[in-house]
Image: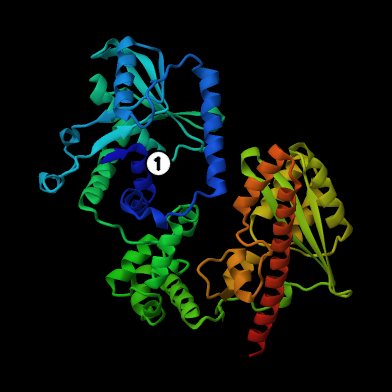
Amino acid sequence: MLLTDALLLDYKRCPRRAFLNLYGDSNEREPERDFLLKLRQESQHHVATVLAEFYPNSQQPQASDEDWQTKAKETEVLMQQGVDCIYRGVLIQPNYRDWGLVSEKVLGTQGDEPILFGTPHLLVKQSGLSKFGNWCYMPISIQLGRRPKPEYKLIAAFYAQLLATIQGVLPTTTEIVLRRQNRYAVDLAEWLPRMRETLAECLQMLLARQEPEVFISRQRCGLCHWYGHCYTLAQSQQHLSLVPGVTPSRYEYLQAIGVDTVASLADACPINLGETMGREVATQLKQQAKAIVENRAIRKSNGFLDVCKTIPTASIELYFDIEAEPERNLDYLLGILLVDRQKNSKCFYPFLAEKPEEEEIIWNQFLAVVNFYEHAPIFHFSEYEVETIKRLAHLYKTPRKQIESLLWRCIDLHKRVIHSVTFPVESYSLKALANWIGFQWRDRGASGDRCVCWYDRWLKTGDRSFLEAILRYNEDDCRATFELKDWLVEFLGKSESI
């Protein structure tokens, strides 16, 4: 068994993913999503940029990736020769028992001895003593993130430990190169012990074939190729992780008091729940479970009392949604659905930057429309729209008074939902809520992530079908926001009259 850096990284992010990658049925593994492929391409470009700018003369082992044993030997030969920089070298530790990570009792039951395996992006020559002479090497990891995440530091420490086994001395430090070539030095005194602890837990699980329990975390699980498999299992178990608000720590407490399904949470004693979680959280979770079990929306006791003020209805209303490209820091589509209640009409206005440099143009077009309807409320479904207005106003020097007036008209329906209604859903995303009230997007499987990929493909290919798909999705987002707003007004208005 090869315990690779990639497998250890998976374990750090989700132990179940690491287990399934090694032992799972490949037929249950979903194809990699377009957004992940795009991220991989961006990562490869980032690595190539760092190499070209800082390490243009790096050398690389010649063996294929499949022949990793030969590649490891070639890496050590390059280190013996004292080359300045080695790209994609292979570091292995075949005698992992020397690290003392797992008890002999566990080891004795295994026939397949694990080999610890890592491929740092770079090994850079440093002054110092090693078994090779008066030089040693430092591993450098190149990551696409903007900040040094814990998992990046853990893998960097893993490389340092593997390198110490080969050159006979621990590197004094190791670096992570982030976006915009920002460099971060990892504190090995802190991260080596943490890495060894995580590595020991990972080895214990994999050697004993202990399949971790499923736990659905929407933000973390959504792009995983095992998501469908795990989600189906969670649904069959009525797993509590499907209840919004059930975090891993809350889940542990619920298990400890014998609450292990959505139905049992709905029936749980609020006093017992509140002892550890607090009354407010306990009430929220119990009501959420009840809504799911009974498949009905429930008005919260602390919900807004004056629907007309908090969710106003006007003769002209604007519904606003944005599509963005995070890698370029670009908001390329500002979509507005204009609803005229007197004429009973809806008209969609998409302000689209077909080229990234057209962002300022569409910003001014957007301002012209919203300023023309100066008294119309602007409904949206997240804080992102408001933050984008502030960003674009600052970037393109829009007068402050104009923006203050615009922001005052913005009404975040997500915030209104969270404070007033408990829906029988697993997520409080626009798509989940709109689907529950009966709204459907025209393109099945369309998402914000896919729009990011579609816009990238448009820029590369000039194929307008990608732009058309983005426009349909953005318009449907605006229409879903409209449908949700009307549903809320009707539902909360009925609740008030009871």
Q: In this view, does 202 lie above or below 258?
A: above
Q: Is residue 132 above or below residue 395?
A: above
293 sits left or right of 198 in the view: right
Pointer 1 residue? 150
Point out the image quarter for the C terminus. Answer: bottom right
Point out the image quarter for the N terminus. Answer: top left
**SS assignment at label 1:** helix
Q: Is residue 261 above or below residue 251?
A: below
Q: Is residue 308 above or below residue 219?
A: below
Residue 330 visible in rendering: no
Residue 100 visible in rendering: yes
Q: Which residue is drawn at 50% across and 79% down?
A: 291
Where on the picture, by quarter, is residue 350?
A: bottom right
x, y percentage for residue 444?
63, 62
Closer to the camera in the image, 23 or 280:
23
Q: Which residue is drawn at 42% across and 66% down?
A: 232
